């Protein structure tokens, strides 16, 4: 997945915001909380390593696979990162990003979810 494809996918998730920070990393948030990060790349067409939050059980599984490792600076909170830009299929990566988004949405207060129109966790823009 290229950074542009990553940004388009994350941008389709409802109530998300995008910020470029940490040395040109593409950071996606919902309710002000990060759910996915793609680091800076040399070009927008380059495939990127993506960091995302996952459940504790999925984190335990993924960190044992060759394709993943704990996300630098974020691993304490069950954050994982793809090791290589093409480590997994785009569809699998989208599924993991969607799960990360849902984890973060679930942690928002009921009032925040209502304000953001996130009564259903699977909605897109």
Image (cartoon, rainbow, N blue to C red):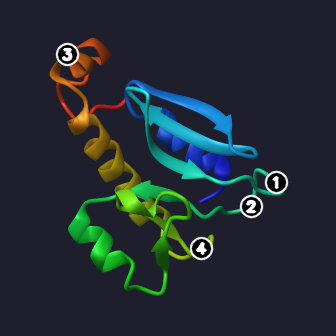
Of the two numbered discs 1 and 3 on the same chain, state the one appearing first in sequence. 1
Q: Which mark is residue 46?
A: 2
| Residue 84 pos. (x, y %) | 61, 75
Of the two numbered discs 4 and 1 on the same chain, state the one appearing first in sequence. 1
Report which residue position mark 1 lands on.
43
**CA–CA distance between discs 2 and 4?**
10 Å
Element class at badge 1: loop
Q: Residues within 10 Å of mark 1 (few under 14, many from 20)?
A: few
**CA–CA distance between discs 4 and 3?**
39 Å
Element class at badge 3: helix
Q: Is residue 6 above or below residue 122?
A: below
The answer to whether 9 appears left or right of 60 in the picture is: right
Could you tell me which residue is drawn at 32 percent across and 59 percent down? Answer: 54
Q: Quarter-wise, where is residue 47 in the image? A: bottom right
Q: Are marks 1 and 2 in contact (CB under 8 Å)?
A: yes
Q: Is residue 1 visible?
A: yes
Q: Nearer the viewer, mark 3 or mark 2?
A: 3
Q: Quarter-wise, where is residue 111 in the image? A: top left
């Amino acid at each position: 997945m290229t950074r542009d494809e990553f940004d388009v996918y994350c941008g389709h998730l409802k109530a998300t915001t995008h910020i470029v920070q940490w040395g040109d990393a593409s950071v996606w948030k919902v309710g002000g909380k990060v759910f996915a990060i793609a680091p800076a790349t040399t070009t927008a067409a380059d495939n990127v390593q993506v960091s995302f939050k996952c459940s504790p059980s999925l984190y335990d599984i993924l960190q044992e696979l060759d394709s993943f490792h704990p996300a630098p600076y974020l691993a304490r909170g069950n954050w994982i990162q793809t090791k290589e830009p093409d480590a997994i299929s785009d569809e699998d990566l989208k599924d993991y990003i969607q799960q990360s988004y849902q984890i973060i949405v679930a942690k928002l207060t009921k009032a925040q979810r209502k304000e953001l129109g996130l009564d259903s966790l699977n909605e897109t823009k």
